[in-house]
Image (cartoon, helix red, strand yellow):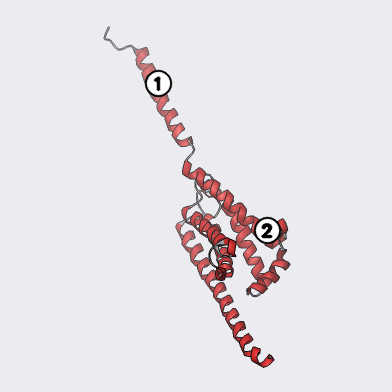
Amino acid sequence: MGHPNRRDLGLLVLRVGTGAVLAAHRTRGHPNRRDLGLLVLRVGTGAVLAAHGTQKLFGWFGGGGIEGTGKAMEAMGFHPGRESAIAAGLGEAGGGALLALGLATPAAGAAAAGAMAGAVAVHAPAGFFAQGGGFEYPAFLGFVAAAIGVTGAGRYSLDHATDHVLDRRWVVITAFLGTAIAAAAVVNRRADDQAAAAAAAEETGPESA
């Protein structure tokens, strides 16, 4: 009566082993809320950025294209205007598309954040809130893009599929450092040009009067 039954022992081992394997597969395949959240955030933010970039580059969605955006860039103090339009469009469209795909995420986030830094500089004199023409909206997009670039794209991304070859720590440091230097140079140059133009206008003002 107490003698072990080989059939029952075999079924016990089979049940335990099968259960362990199934549990392991369920754990691995179970959707991760963090990764799903990053996917939603990436796609939403990337789509908005890409739409703005295609306005500048191709004139889509009612945008001015390179020529129209270039003239607007000149009026806002970014010289040369055409090259500034191309750089801003590529930062937004390229960075946004890569963010949505989750590919080269640090570089994509840095590029998008750098493009938004220029927009922040333009809107800063109007204050913070968007309803008054302030820099709230581009600052928000820039911070979100930068946060994704630092955090990483998560499991549901091309970075994950390619074993994070373009998502290494050195890529994060290089991308954000390079973007910060470039954005600071562009913004400071614009500020210097505007200051020089204002000084020239003050000098010619009394003479013309």
Q: Judging from the image, what secondary structure is the residue with disc 2 in? A: helix
Work out how far the residue at label 2 is from the one at label 1, CA to CA, in angstroms: 57 Å
Q: Which is closer to the viewer, label 2 or label 1?
A: 2
Q: Judging from the image, what secondary structure is the residue with disc 1 in? A: helix
Q: Where 113 falls versus 27 (above or below)?
A: below
The picture places residue 106, in percent across and down from the top left corner, at 51, 57
Which residue of the protein is positioned furthest toward the left in this rendering? 2
The picture places residue 86, in percent across and down from the top left corner, at 66, 66
Give the quadrant of residue 83.
bottom right
The picture places residue 128, in percent across and down from the top left corner, at 53, 64
The picture places residue 79, in percent across and down from the top left corner, at 64, 75
**Residue sitting at x 39%, y 25%:** 17
Instruction: Please state, as top left, top right, bottom left or bottom right, where the N terminus lies in the image.
Output: top left
Between 208 and 38, the one nearer to me in the picture: 208
Left or right, 119 with respect to 7, comes to right
Q: Where 72 falls versus 13 (above or below)?
A: below
Amino acid found under the numbered disc labelled 2: Thr
The residue beneath circle 2 is 54
Q: Where 28 falls versus 55 (above or below)?
A: above
Amino acid found under the numbered disc labelled 1: Arg
The residue beneath circle 1 is 15
Q: Is residue 101 visible?
A: no
